[in-house]
Image (tube, helix red, strand yellow):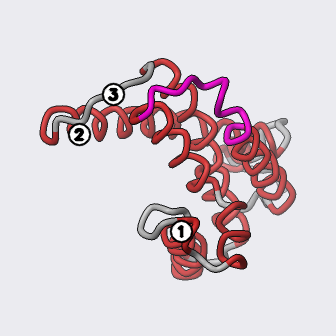
């Protein structure tokens, strides 16, 4: 049987990691636009003063967006249906919000919750944003947060590539 034109498009000679990166790049652009919009609204509507560098904030945002998008690729790679994907998203994103220090002080959480929160990229991104926007910290002083987010991104991208299957 000779493959049809659609099958040729779904079977290009690329590795799974290349497919994953190709899916991530356009979403990174959209993510940066969303971050810029939220930041602009914070400044215009709530008079938030930005004490640090916007360039450093953008550079600190990149690994966070990449990590979250890579986690989305993991969810889509292991899910067999849209319903299952939604359930897995709730399983990851709800604890991220609750255990990151966004809603509750991180230091006031039980030690086990802090351990889990330390693995999640949102915890580190909040520290980056608070450091740069509120305290005027340099990105160099937040290297540990960047490294933790980068490690999460690499692990999630690897997991997504390993679980990726081409299918029609």
Vertical relation: 126 (above or below) 109:
above
Residue sitting at x 64%, y 64%? 76
Please say whether residue 168 is visible from this viewpoint. Answer: no
Give the quarter of the image for residue 147. Answer: top right
Q: Residue at x 71, y 64 (%)?
A: 77
Which residue carries the number 1 mark? 93
Whether residue 48 sits left or right of residue 128 in the image: it is left
What secondary structure is the stretch in magenta mostly built from? helix
Q: Nearer the viewer, mark 1 or mark 3?
A: 3
Is residue 138 at least partly visible in the picture?
A: yes
From the image, state whether disc 2 or disc 3 is nearer to you: 3
Nearer to me, 97 or 30:
97
Query: Label 3 belongs to which residue?
Result: 50
Instruction: Give me the C-alpha separation between circle 2 and circle 3.
Output: 10 Å
Q: Mark 2 sits on what residue?
A: 42
Q: In the image, residue 5 lies at what x, y percent?
A: 66, 43
Relative placement, left or right, of 37 versus 145 is left
Dividing the picture into quadrants, the one containing residue 112 is bottom right
Q: Is residue 114 magenta?
A: no
Q: Residue 157, percent across and down?
A: 77, 49
- Asked if the residues shown at circle 2 and circle 3 are in contact, with their CB atoms under 8 angstroms apart, the answer is no
Magenta-drawn segment = 135-146
Count of picture labels: 3
User: Which is nearer the N-term, disc 1 or disc 2?
Assistant: 2
Q: Position of residue 84 (x, y in %)?
A: 59, 81
For the point 80% across and 42% down, the residue is 17
Q: Nearer the viewer, residue 94 or 90?
A: 94
Q: Is residue 33 left or right of residue 21?
A: left
Question: Which element is circle 2 on?
Answer: helix
The answer to if 142 sits in the magenta stretch is yes
């Amino acid at each position: 049987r000779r493959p049809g034109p659609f099958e040729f498009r779904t079977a290009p000679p690329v590795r799974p990691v290349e497919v994953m990166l190709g899916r991530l790049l356009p979403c990174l652009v959209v993510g940066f636009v969303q971050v810029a919009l939220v930041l602009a609204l914070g400044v215009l509507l709530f008079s938030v003063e930005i004490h640090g560098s916007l360039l450093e904030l953008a550079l600190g945002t990149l690994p966070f967006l990449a990590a979250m998008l890579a986690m989305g690729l993991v969810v889509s790679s292991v899910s067999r249906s849209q319903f299952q994907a939604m359930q897995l998203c709730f399983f990851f994103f709800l604890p991220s919000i609750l255990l990151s220090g966004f809603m509750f002080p991180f230091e006031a959480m039980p030690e086990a919750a802090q351990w889990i929160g330390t693995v999640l990229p949102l915890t580190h991104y909040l520290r980056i944003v608070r450091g740069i926007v509120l305290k005027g910290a340099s990105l160099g002083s937040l290297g540990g947060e960047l490294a933790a987010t980068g490690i999460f991104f690499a692990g999630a991208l690897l997991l997504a590539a390993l679980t990726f299957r081409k299918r029609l």
